[in-house]
Image (cartoon, rainbow, N blue to C red):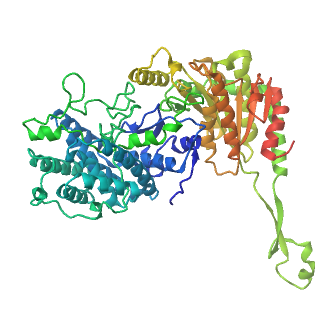
Amino acid sequence: MKRKTTSMKASDFTHECRGTSRTFGRNERIDIVFRGNMAGTDGNKIIYPSLDLKSTLDENQVAVSRGYIDHETGHLRYTDMEAFQSYARQAIEAGTPFRKDIANGIEDPRMERLVMQDYEGATDNLTAVANAVCRQMLETMASDTDSPWYAFVPVTLANMGRVNNGLRGDDLSDFLGAVQARMSAGQYRMCVDWAARITGLASTQDSLALADEIFDAIVELEPGTDKPDDDAYSDTDTGDSDDAGDADSDGDGSGDSDSSGRGSQPDSDGDDDADDDGNGTGHDDSEGDNSVDTADDDTPSDGDGKPGVNDADHDDPRLKVGGTKGLRGDVTAAIKDAVADHTGDGSEYRTFSTEFDTWSDKTTDDEIGTLMRDKDNLSRYDEAVNETAGKINVMRRKLETALAARRDVRWVGSQKAGRLDPRRLVGAYNAEDDVYRFREEDNDVETAVTVLVDLSTSMIRNGKNTIAMQSVIAIAEALEKTHVQYEILGFCTNRHSTATVKLRSSMDAYMRRDDYDTRHPRGFNFTRFEAINMAIFKAFNQPLNLCRTSLVAVERVPCKSYVCNCDGESLLLAYDRLRVRPEPRKVLMVLSDGAPMINGTNDRTRLARHLYSSIRDIEDDGVEVLGIGIVDSAVRNFYPRHVVVHAIKDLTTVALEQIAKILLGRRL
């Protein structure tokens, strides 16, 4: 079903995108990550600019953003990336990079047509991003009076192909009108006929073959004037045309140009311009296997590392045409331009990248997963249960009694079997057969509970990690025999983890490229420079008896190198899982020992504001939030509902009162 596009908080848009690409890409496990001011794809993930999470995207920005994601997901799903990359490399090595620009202009509408067939909502989204690209291209054309006519062929093919796919809009119509005015009638007609053939292409290989054919046809027109007579096209077999050739048609397609209008590495080869300067040259923004490959080898070089200049006096027409920078349109530049006002000015919370955040559980091959699997934890679990057995039993009895009393008990009458309904005695006397009733009980309050535990190193002071472990075990044991669904998660950051090392490497490369001093990471407008580690100790669908070793790891993880706590984002990550639960009532309990803190962030005020606003956003969505301070009263500064636990005995007194009020709506 098509989804209505409305304005949206940046935090909500982040939730929509986080984890997997949208509806039609879920089976492909295509991740969307937020990194710097970048946009692009590396072959299995889509890079989106990091947003100021307090900002609000308007309706058009949401539509353009979704269109960008649908476009990139379409490439990852329908474009033969290996074949396209090989073609692009060969074109560059041959000194004819213009060939890949043509290929990209063909492949974009070919795969977008498949996207629209697969996902109904993609049509509106792709129309929005197409409009955004065309607006940029119109600005480029207004200032570009020197490029030869064929430099416009890639973006013209892309947009004509989109018209043929059914996209419509004023910006596309205006763009095609501008192209028609720029080209001769014969040149424009040839583009129309080429674009008509895109609809029949079945594969990326077909796109590449058509690109070679078009390139050869253009070369055949050289040497000669940049605007040959229309008769030059009269003997060319270009196939049938359609309404894409009408500059006045209500079309709305787009291409993929950067802010200068010059295409660099085509997005269908996995090499979008994941840079932040909008110059379309492309830069490698990180190191290692997770980097977006935006090598600078997509333009000819004159030997000093600078882009080569098309030599009008070159003797070889193939090199003259092939060395031309084709304007192909760029959705990456369009999305960066669309959300530029929401990438922050340094006054609000903004993460550098979500790309390296991790989730650990009993099955993961990492330190937290190893701690969860340790069988020695079983004896520690039994020890913790024995130490708190009386308190757990008190909690369980109170909750079970209260939940049972909360059941909605009613009698259903007018039945032909069951107990005699005292209100139907006259009917029974008259031998009527529907004078019985039976008792019906509704299930317990349908509630989903997430328990989220701070795992930072500060938790080892004063035995707070032990109290946290005892608390989650007590809560789990008490809830296990009720109908309340629950899960137990943990959060922390690790400055020494492989994920954080990769994040810092990516950040350093980003800063070097943009002339930042790497010794002063606070000099640019990001708040978080560490990877978040989320731990799943018990998932909703897991029975407690299979998670006992995992729960003991709550005590052990803070003893490792998991130093800090990014509370605001961690709550939102837990909320992402809780919000999709079917239960109408949702509760988030957070066990913490202080305010948020991240290494490398000097302004903790931004961290505190973000935690405060995150709690309010979660509560505004109908989730009831309870902060449980572990030997620390800092929760009072952030959580409207809060209690402080100094020892496990407090859990069955003040803490249980709050838990009961949330779960049952009244005191025990």
Taking the spot 25% from the left edge, 34% from the top edge, the residue there is: 298
Q: Nearer the viewer, residue 296 or 665?
A: 296
- Rendered location of residue 613, percent (x, y): 67, 36
Q: Which quadrant would the C terminus be assigned to in this image?
A: top right
The residue most toward the left is 315
Residue 290 as seen in the image, left or right of residue 297:
right
Give the image location of residue 397, x and y in percent: 83, 41
Residue sitting at 51 percent across and 43 percent down?
Answer: 17
Residue drawn where x is 63% and y is 27% of the image: 606
Q: Residue furthest top?
A: 519
Q: Quadrant of residue 370?
A: top right
**Residue that sits furthest to the bottom in the current view:** 430
Residue 152 in view: yes
Residue 419 figure quarter: bottom right
Residue 76 location (% of width, % of height): 36, 44
Number of marks in picture = 0
Picture layout, residue 651 above or below residue 583:
above
* For residue 242, side relative to residue 42 (left or right): left
Residue 546 visible at all: no
63 and 399: which one is in front? 63
Where residue 227 appears, x then y in whole percent?
15, 50
Q: Is residue 124 left or right of residue 592?
A: left
- In the image, is residue 400 above or below residue 121? above
For the residue pair 583 and 222, the one nearer the viewer reads as 222
